[in-house]
Image: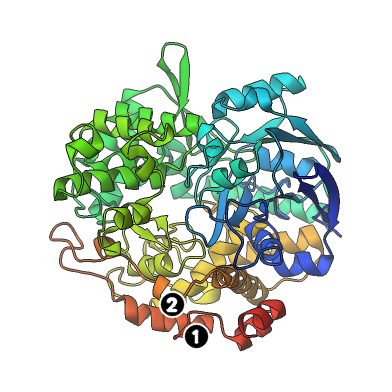
Amino acid sequence: MKGYHGKFLEVDLTSKTTQDLPLSEDFCKKYIGGATMAAALVYERVHPETDPLSPDNPMVMATGPFTGTPIPMVSRYAVAGISPLTGFWGEATSGGVFPFRLKGSGWDGLIVTGKADGPVYLFLNNGRAEIRDASALWGEDSYETQNIIKADLSDDKVSVACIGPAGEKQIRYACIMNDKGRAAGRCGMGALMGSKNLKAVAVAGNKRPAFADAGKVGELAKQAIKDINGNLVAVAFREYGTLMYMDMGMTLGDTPAKYFTKSVFPVGDVTGQALRQRYSVANYACRGCPIGCGRDLKQYKPGLDVDGPEYETTVAFGPLCMNTNFDSIIEANHLCNVHGIDTISAGVSVAYAIYLYEQGALTKDRVGFELKWGDDEAILKLIEMIVNQKGIGELLSRGTLAMARELDRDDGEAAQIKGLEVPMHDGRAFHGLAVSYATGPRGACHLKGDYYNVDLGNMVLEYMILPSDRLVSEGKGEPAAKFQSFKDLFDALTLCKFAPLQVPQLCEMLNALTGWEFSPEDLLKAGDRSVNIKRAVSSKFGLTREHDTIPKICRDALDEGTTAGIQPDLETMLKEYYQYRGWDWETGKPTKEKLIDLGLNQAAEDLYS
């Protein structure tokens, strides 16, 4: 087999044993890698009664065939399982150096089940695996944990993915941190890791699978670097990071403010330009990336460099809370990274708390202090209460859906889909994004079909995914489904969502690495299979068509900005989407015929037995 090691490491923490799990070439060809392969492995290991925080819920870390190759922008890995936050399929991805080191350790990924009787960490190095004691690490923050493990192993080239105190406490949207401030942020994978008493995974090694055509891989990689360096959006990312979108986002009505009830705010205070003007900013690039969209703030405080906030975090703790104090946004981001919590879910939960206070559903007695829009000190206090599980912070740490139900509020007021908080792009501004949100494999996700990119001019001609009026719903369902499948593949290959590579390039790269003969049609079918295997996992856990929706707070028309008076026609788009997908309109399940057509025969048998 080319492009793969052909094996995962299977770890049972209860018995503290490890063994290799061989992967057949047919299995790799079917599920590619990353989050898609993780979904196939999780599907066969869970049942409807599996509690997300039980030892039976597997945690999978997976690379893909692109990981560790000369192809640029491929240092990504996926971590997956049943989400402790949503109770459905959960996945998160991250970059940095860790994905290269994980692939270099000699495995394509690992599956962790069981629960250790005390804190442990895993060390994978050139085909050797150890389970090591981590008692001294329990309670350490995510940055210190990484430093201590590197010192313990006497190897600064070791890369570490770990949880902070939030994961140890199993906070429902705890994340996994690697390479300082890189985060596998969404769905509470840090809580899953913490439930197993697994503090960290340390990886090292230089084992690389052979390529089918190494010369062709090198040529394709060089051309890809040229294409990326000549891409205007890539230049903007390099200069300002993801914050380069802030002022454009507000102009388009795509950047939510005041807990999704506004779209106009003092944008000049929180742009990428403002960050560069006020702070000493250096670029951070994941391994093998020519862009470097990450921000490092040098000497933010005397003797302290911190990871700068990207777009999602800045909006979540900024405009969404009507806060324009950049210092507090940076502090909030750092606090979340230190403790290891998802900045999107945390920011949306904090904004919801302020909204509830304004509505009278939360009081000063319940909170402990007043909550007002734009109060940066209150925002930081709430984050501290979340990570310390103190007072109202414990409720906020369960997410907006739990908050709404605890306080007897309408679910439509909770800015979440399938239990996962809505990110910082607005479906009212791009209707194709609205249907992608409603149907996303893990819930509300701006990366599983970032349809705003299509309507801003990034077409995919091979699949007839073409730009159109962003504020029109009719005709968006099918292209949104295709684009969702296409982008789901990025987390299988694995490839950064910002990589401006075209379908023929991806096919050529995959074929040169593996010796396969994937066509654009084969690639899209693999994406369809990816979305459907994840849907089948969630269907096991009670997902229905009623879950494919957008909450009123994120759907009702606003009275300001470029989307004033407009809301997406979700019903029309969903019918188009379902027709393309081959999903049953009554149940929301993939039809038996569709599952069989995609080779998901076991899922067809399980869902229709």
Label 2 sits on residue = 545
Q: Between 135 and 382, which is closer to the camera in this rendering?
A: 135
Q: Using residue 88 as the reference point, say whether residue 43 is left or right of it.
A: right
Q: Amino acid at mark 1?
A: Asp
Residue 51: image quadrant is: bottom right
Image x and y of residue 153, in percent: 76, 23
Q: Using residue 225 as the reference point, say whether residue 419 is left or right of it.
A: left
Residue drawn at the location 63% of the way across and 73% of the way down: 529
Report the disc number at residue 136.
none
Q: Mark 1 and mark 2 in contact (Cβ < 8 Å)?
A: yes
Q: Amino acid at mark 2?
A: Arg
Tell me the element at label 2. helix
Image x and y of residue 23, in percent: 82, 61
Residue drawn at the location 83% of the way across and 65% of the way down: 25
Image x and y of residue 393, in percent: 35, 38
Position of the C terminus by quadrant: bottom right
Q: Between 403 and 510, which is closer to the camera in this rendering?
A: 403
Position of the N terminus by quadrant: bottom right
User: Please, which colouring scheme is shown?
Assistant: rainbow
Instruction: Say whether residue 161 is visible.
Output: yes
Distance between the alpha carbons at the discs numbered 2 and 1:
9 Å
Image x and y of residue 42, in percent: 67, 61
Residue drawn at the location 17% of the way across and 61% of the way down: 558
Q: Using residue 34 as the reference point, say whether residue 20 is left or right of it.
A: right
Label 1 sits on residue = 584
